[in-house]
Amino acid sequence: MTIVIGMTSDDTVLSRGGFEDQKRNSLGLPRAETPEEESANRETLLRYINLQLIARGLPTAMAAEEQSFADVSRGLLKNFQQKNRLLLDHRCPADARIESFLTSHFADVAEPGSMRLPGRTFILDYHGLARELSLPAYGHEYLSDEVQSYRARNGVLHNPKHDRRTTVGTFHVVEGGLPIAGDKRAVPRAAFVKLFQAAMSPPQDYLELPFTVHCDVKAYSWVSLLLRPLVCPAVPGISSEKRMEVRFFAPGRFVSNLDFVESIFGNAGDPDIPENDAGLDVEHWTGHSGAVILAPQLVELKKKDLGLPHVSEATERQKRDCMCWESEDELYNDGSAFKVTCRTDAGVVVTLIADNYFGYCKKEVKTQISYATNLYGGSEEEHAGGALTYPSHNLGDDVQINSVRYNGQTFANIVKEYPELIEVRPEGYGIDRQFPDLIYLPEDAFASLVEQSIRWERDGQTHTIPLLPGQVYMAPSGYHLRMEKHPAAPSWRLVGTSGEGVFCHKP
């Protein structure tokens, strides 16, 4: 699959006093620039990346003319490196929340300290860094077995190895949390621990940063990104918007996946900075945290090595979900790509993706948004849906309304409750003030298609109004009538629609 992402790294610009405003930092919003300005801004971005590499003790792709700038800053950067070494076990607040959940949830099946996220990562704290890191600093293409990336004038083109459009056998969920749907594969907790630990130990070549691939000494590192996707939009005057936090981790070679993800969900900045700590933003945080970890190497693991049972000892569900083995060399999930998710009602969800297909990354963030909406309540994720349906029936040529029998409502009740909506006529019916084609009927009206009229009794007198196409006649119960032409015949009929809807929910 070929994916073209608009907005080049040139669009993420640096001003003299630092990065542009927060919107540009988060979303990479472009601005009109001359070619000279574009070139200057990109050079500043490259310098920033190289300083980040130096600060983390990694090789750089610094041009000779930039070396003097690095020399001037070297003392400050060495000081920063030393502090990084002292804080090797420190985790940003979001990572600390996720690690705390993993440690607690798997305390009975995992060794202490074995469920830790990557400690020292290249943090993508501004939009556009991922795009520059996904290509050589002074080159226009990066080629590996897993992804091919090319620089283009209007952006960048990434070709990941796989383009999957099937979900068969893809979605795995860890046991011991929320209920697992029948179409998902249930993963034993001990097996997830081994999968997680294997995800934290990628092959060395997976950690290669494309940015330094043409340098004499290459940089190898994890890359991480903080997202704050919207869960519940703001309602002006009622409530503020609510967001969850998602930490995305990828070995350096797969930084293009993070480029793709931040182009959709934005960049929430440096997770170590207090102003980006969701835990301190009680007004806008839903209280939910997520982690997504790319680990394509997991497809090479064997079922037996993960502690899955032999088929002779497996349960019926384990047999159905292929969570057992007959031959010792059987690969987990038959060596095919998969996603395995651990989530409970504690508000933390952790997912390992055994592939670098871009679609899995995007959909996983949306899945975690769904998780947050389900726990938070009062909101729906975009992929969820449904319809509020009102049953309708063909009533033939006539119908007798009896609202009192149905729900006890009368025309007088409706007029009393909604005087601002109804213009009452002396004959005993009403017309909606905003929608004049909506007619309010008495509780005992009789509609006849043959007579093409609606009649009722009031104070011993019979009153009638014409029954016309294009108008809706509503009884006090909420039930309403209309004339409707038959779709396949030249005849007309009365159609009645219930006033009580049914919400058909698509989870």
Image (spheres, grey):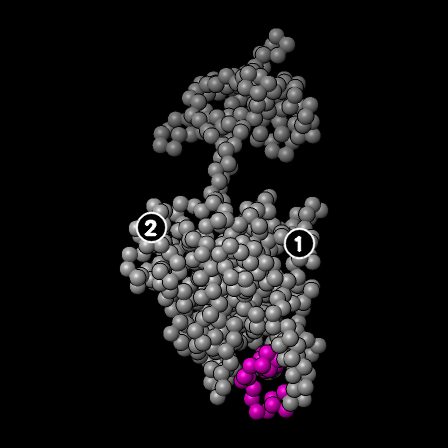
Above or below: residue 344 compared with residue 227: above
Above or below: residue 186 compared with residue 264: above
Nearer the N terminus, badge 2 or badge 1?
1
Q: Between marks 2 and 1, how big is the CA–CA gap? A: 48 Å
Which quadrant is home to the N terminus?
bottom left
The number of numbered discs placed on residues in the rendered structure image is 2
Q: What amino acid type should be assigned to the residue bearing mark 1?
A: His
Q: Position of residue 216 (x, y in %)?
A: 48, 88
**Residue named by callout 2:** 313
Comparing 411 with 127, the one in front is 127
Above or below: residue 224 compared with residue 393: below
Comparing 98 with 13, the one in front is 98
Comparing 493 with 243, the one in front is 243
Determine whether, in the image, residue 17 is placed left or right of residue 366. Answer: right
Tell me if mark 2 has few (under 14), some (14-19) or many (20+) residues whose alpha carbon lies within 10 angstroms of its own: few
Q: Nearer the viewer, mark 2 or mark 1?
A: 2
Q: Residue furthest left?
A: 327
Q: What amino acid type should be assigned to the residue bearing mark 2?
A: Glu
**Residue named by callout 1:** 284
Numbered disc 2: secondary structure:
helix
Question: Which residue is drawn at the image coordinates 69% and 30% (left, top)?
Answer: 420
Looking at the image, do the residues carrying marks 2 and 1 touch, with CB atoms under 8 Å apart?
Answer: no
Q: Position of residue 92 (x, y in %)?
A: 63, 65
Question: Which residue is drawn at the image coordinates 42% and 21% (left, top)?
Answer: 396
Per the picture, the main secondary structure of the magenta-coloured stretch is: helix
Quarter of image, res 464: top right
Above or below: residue 64 compared with residue 360: below
